[in-house]
Amino acid sequence: MKNILVATDFSIRANNALSLAKVIAAKTQGLITLLHVVELPGRSHTSTEDLLNADQMTDVYVLKLIERAEEELKAIKEANSEESLQINVEIRRGEPFKQIRTYVASHDIDLVIAGDKGHSEFEDIFIGSLSDKLVRTMDCPVITVKAAIADRPLQNILYAVNGEHDEEPVMLYLQALNEYFDAKIHLVWINTPYDFRDDSDTKPWLYSLAHQYFSTNYAVSVYNHHDKDFGVVYCADEVKADMIVLGVSKRSVVQRFITGDSLAEDVSDHTIRPVLTLKLK
């Protein structure tokens, strides 16, 4: 959480993502990099003369977009200059998803935060939103943000325990959040008719898991609901979670193309709370 990338298109949700990055960076003394990607328009392929004219117009258009992005980034940086934050700004050209992945890989980014735009069912199947692509493919943790967040440290963080994979990567991250923010960690098992476990078995297992990573400031619970994603959302509402944490496995990525969205995508669609996803082993 020392090197935070915020992908921005200057929308309200991107600004909300920056607000969360500032809350995290203030506690971790981290560097925030604001990255805006200028998408390049397609080229025209009519006659040679038309192509030259189109190319010239495209170049002028792209330069205008870059100039506007530079102004926007400068304004954001100036607006936050009085705060004790390190904010770096970057502009790249190309396809946003590819440019973000390349930047993350080459700059040692350990947390990506992006606004969750939402999308149509058609886009979900064939294209997918930028935030969904980041969640599915990034090796580092990704937080998607919709609504404005409270200007205070994170106080309550809910983790929906997976139960099928080695959860150590997520638990270590939760341990760090617990220590950095003195945040209460809520470990919950979502009981559904299709994945039901008795409380007599589940609660001792959850307590055992919690005791390995937290000495204080945690809670365990079992929440019953017929849909896992809505169970996570409603449980987060009950504990007033500042953020929902979910583990993402390779299987869930593959399963998405067979049965539909992954749990992380479904929860993100149905909640206004920030959702942090990490890869499970």
Image (cartoon, rainbow, N blue to C red):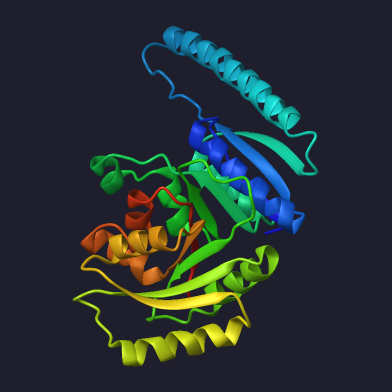
Question: Residue 46 placed where, x, y %?
Answer: 36, 14
| Residue at the spot 35% in from the left edge and 67% down from the top edge | 252
Question: Residue 45 placed where, x, y %?
Answer: 38, 18
Q: Is residue 106 above or below residue 38?
A: below
Horizontally, residue 88 falls left or right of residue 55, namely right
| Residue at the spot 33% in from the left edge and 43% down from the top edge | 127
Q: Is residue 101 above or below residue 49?
A: below
Q: How many numbered marks appear?
A: 0
User: In this orientation, which residue lies closer to the viewer: 103 or 234?
Assistant: 234
Q: Is residue 211 above or below residue 75?
A: below
Horizontally, residue 73 falls left or right of residue 118, namely right
Question: Residue 43 placed where, x, y %?
Answer: 44, 22
Mark yes or no: residue 269 visible.
Answer: yes
User: Residue 181's quadrant in the figure?
Assistant: bottom right
| Residue at the spot 49% in from the left edge and 76% down from the top edge | 219
User: In this orientation, which residue lies closer to the viewer: 188 or 43?
Assistant: 188
In the picture, the quarter occupied by the N terminus is bottom right
Question: Residue 233 placed where, x, y %?
Answer: 35, 59
User: Residue 260's quadrant in the figure?
Assistant: bottom left
Horizontally, residue 224 falls left or right of residue 173, namely left
Mark yes or no: residue 103 visible.
Answer: no
Q: Is residue 125 above or below residue 74?
A: below
